[in-house]
Amino acid sequence: MLGKAFEGSIDYLQIMDENGNVDKSLVPPDLSDDKIVEMYRNMCFARTLDAKMLSLQREGRAATYAPLVGEEATQIGSAMAMRSNDYFVPNFRQHGVFLVRGYPLENFITYWKGFEDGSRGLKEIKSLDVAVPVGTQMPHAAGLAFAMKYKGADSAVVSYVGDGGTSEGDFYEAMNFAGVYKLPLVIIIENNQWAISVPRKKQTAAETLAQKAIAAGIKGIQVDGNDVIAVYKATKDALANAKDGPTLIECVTYRMSMHTTSDDPTKYRSEEEVNAWKAKDPIKRVKLYLMGKNLWNDELESKMNAEHESAIDAAVEKVEKEFKPDPKSMYKNIYSFMPDVLNNELNDALSENFWKE
Amino acid sequence: MQMNMVKSLNNALDIILRDNENAILLGEDVGKDGGVFRVTDGLFDKYGEKRVVDTPLSESAIVGTAIGMALGGMHPIPEIQFAGFMFLSFEQLVNHAARYRSRSRGDYSVPMVVRTPVSGGVKALEIHSESPEAFYSHIGGLVVVEPSNPYDAKGLLISAMKLDDPVIFLEPTKLYRLFKQEVPEESYEVPIGKASKVREGNAITIITYGTMVNVVSDVVSKKGTDAEIIDLRTINPLDESTILESVKKTGRAVVVHEAPTSFGVGAEVAARIAEKAIFDLSAPVVRVAAPSFFYPFPGYEEYYLPNEVKISKAIDKVLSA
C-alpha cells in the first residue's frame, strides 16, 4: 500500500501591512494603542542607536559592529512579548532586544568598543552573553530552558538565530533536544535574507525555515518579521504554550545594511532588491498607523529623536571619559581560582611593566 | 571497600547526586543502560529519569545544553561516550565553556564536569582510544583531570564538582577494571591542581599520568631504579612546583604519556623544566610517548603505545648522560 506517513503545513501571520492597515481580529487583546506607541519609540531608539554605533565605528571609536537596521520589528516585537521572568539568548545583532530588556547603554557601548567589561549586567536582565560563532548559542538556550523546567521556574527562554544559523548543526541539535524534553523554549529565526553575502536560497532548499520545526516535532510558524504586531503575537502565543514545549518562529525580515562594518553589500546584492524591501520598512508602517489614529505627529517625533540622541551621546561620553581597561581582569576571570601558572604570567607582565602603565 | 575504577566513579556519582540537587547526569545510554562501561549503573533506578537523562545522539547538544544548564544554576555532568566523539562538542568547549566566565567578567560561570573515556590498550574500534588532554589544556579556562587509580578517580571527581568551573574529566578505559584498591565508601576529596608522588627517589624524576603511571611503576620496580614518579592527576592547571622541586633534586627527567609526542603535555613539561631548572639538569629531558600521529586501528596498538622497553631505554639514556 501507499499512504501518507505525515502531513504538515506552516501558517503565515501578518497583522499590520506595509501601509499600516491592521487586521483587528488578530490583534492580541492586551496590545493597547499606548503599547503600540511604545513599540514605535523602541524601534526608533534602536535605529538611532544603530546609526550612532555605525558612525562611532567609522570614526575609529568602536570595533567591528553588526547593524540591525531593518530588523527592528522582529526584535522589538518579540522582546516586548517576553515577561520579566523570561530569559533571552542573543546572537550578536539583538541590540533592540537589549534596549527593551533594560541593558545599560554604557555597557552596550563598552561591549562594541571591544571590551568584555560591557557584558557585565547581562545576567541581571536575564540575558546570556552575546554569542559570536553563528548558531552555537542554540544549545545554551535549550539547556537554560531545561534548567527552568528542572527547577520548576515559571520562566521560558527566547533565543535568536539568523537564517544562516539555521544551517548549523547546533541549530538542529538544540531544536531536537528541546523537542524531546518539551522544553519551554521559543526560537526566533531572524531571517534577514543574507548570511554575509550568501542569500537565503543558498542556505536550504526548504521553502520556509519555519518548516524545520516539523522535523523536530515542535510548533512552527512564519510571520512577517517587519510587522511588529505579528511578531509580538506569535511570541506571546509561543510563550503561553511554552510549558507544553518549544515553538519555532521564522520572522521574515531584511538586513537593510551590511552584515558588519567589514563588508560592502553592494558587492553581492542589487539596489532593486534593497529598494523593494525599503517599501516594507518596519518602522514606517507603524508611524502611518499611529498618525492615522492621531496618536503621533511631527512634533512628538522630533522631541523623541532629540531625547534618544542625547541619551546615546551622554552614554558614549560617559564611557569614553570613565572606562579604563584593566588588563589584569583578563587573567582574573579564567577560573574561579588563580592557578600558579596564570599568576606567574600576570606577575611577569606587571613586574616587567609590559603594559607601560 | 575494594573497588575498581568503574565502581569508585559510580560511588562518587552516587554521592554527588545524593548531595547536590542541582547535579544531573546526561549522555548517550547513561540511563537505563548504565553507560557503555557501566559507570552510571543503577543510578537511573535510584534517582530517576529527571536526574539521569538519556539524551539523543547529539554530542554538541549534550555539552552545549549542559553549558546552558550550568548558566541556569545547575551543575550538570555530561558524559561523552568516547573521547573520540567529543570533537563534535569541541566548539562548545573551546568557544563557550572555556570563555564564559571571562566574557562576562565573572558574572557567569559554567560549573560542569564533562566525563569521557580516554586512552587505548583495550582493542577497541577506531576512534575509541584517543588521548586528547593536550587539546583541552591548551585553551585555558578548562580544568583537565585524569586519574590513574580508583582512589584518586573518586576523590578527584568529587573535588571537580566543588569547583565553579568547567572540568574535563578523562577516564582511562584500560584502568576501569584493571585493578582494585581500598576506597572509602564515604565522600572525600583529592585536590585538583596537585600532582602526587607515587614513589620517592633521588636519581631521576619520571613525570606521567593516566594509563602510564602503572607501566612506569612496573618498569622502575623491575629495574630497581631510584626514581621519583610523579602522577600529574590534573593536567591543567599544571602543578609546576611539584615537578620543578623534584627535578631540582634529581637533576634528570623523563616525561611519559600515551598521547602523541609532538605538541603534547610532555612538550609543556619539558619546556617548563628548561625555562626554570635547566641549570639543575645533568641530562636532557626525554619524552616517551606515542609516535607523532593519531591512534591506529586496534591491531597495531601494541606497536603504537609506549611500552616497558621504550620507557626502560629512556631511563637508561637519561641516567647515563
Image: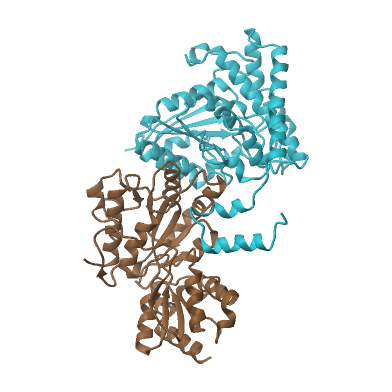
Chain colours: A cyan, B brown
Q: Which of B200 and A227 is in front in this view?
A: B200
| A50 relative to B296, above or below | above
Q: Which of A120 and A166 is in front in this view?
A: A120
Residue A284, image x, y percentages: 67, 19
Q: Can residue A67 be seen in this view?
A: yes
| A244 relative to B160, above or below | above
Residue B58, image x, y percentages: 41, 50
Residue B56, image x, y percentages: 37, 47
Q: Seen from this angle, which residue lies furthest bottom? A: B320
| Picture residue at 70% right of the left edge, 16% below the top | A301
| Picture residue at 72% right of the left edge, 44% below the top | A262
Q: Nearer the viewer, residue A45 or B124?
A: A45
**Residue A225 located left or right of residue B70:** right
| Picture residue at 48% right of the left edge, 85% below the top | B314
Q: Nearer the viewer, residue A118 or A128?
A: A118
Query: In the picture, residue A225 is in which quadrant?
Result: top right
Q: Can residue A182 be seen in this view?
A: no
Query: In the picture, residue A132 is in which quadrant?
Result: top right
The quadrant of the rendering that contains the N terminus of chain A is: top left
**Residue B235 located left or right of residue A196:** left
Query: In the picture, residue A294 is in which quadrant?
Result: top right
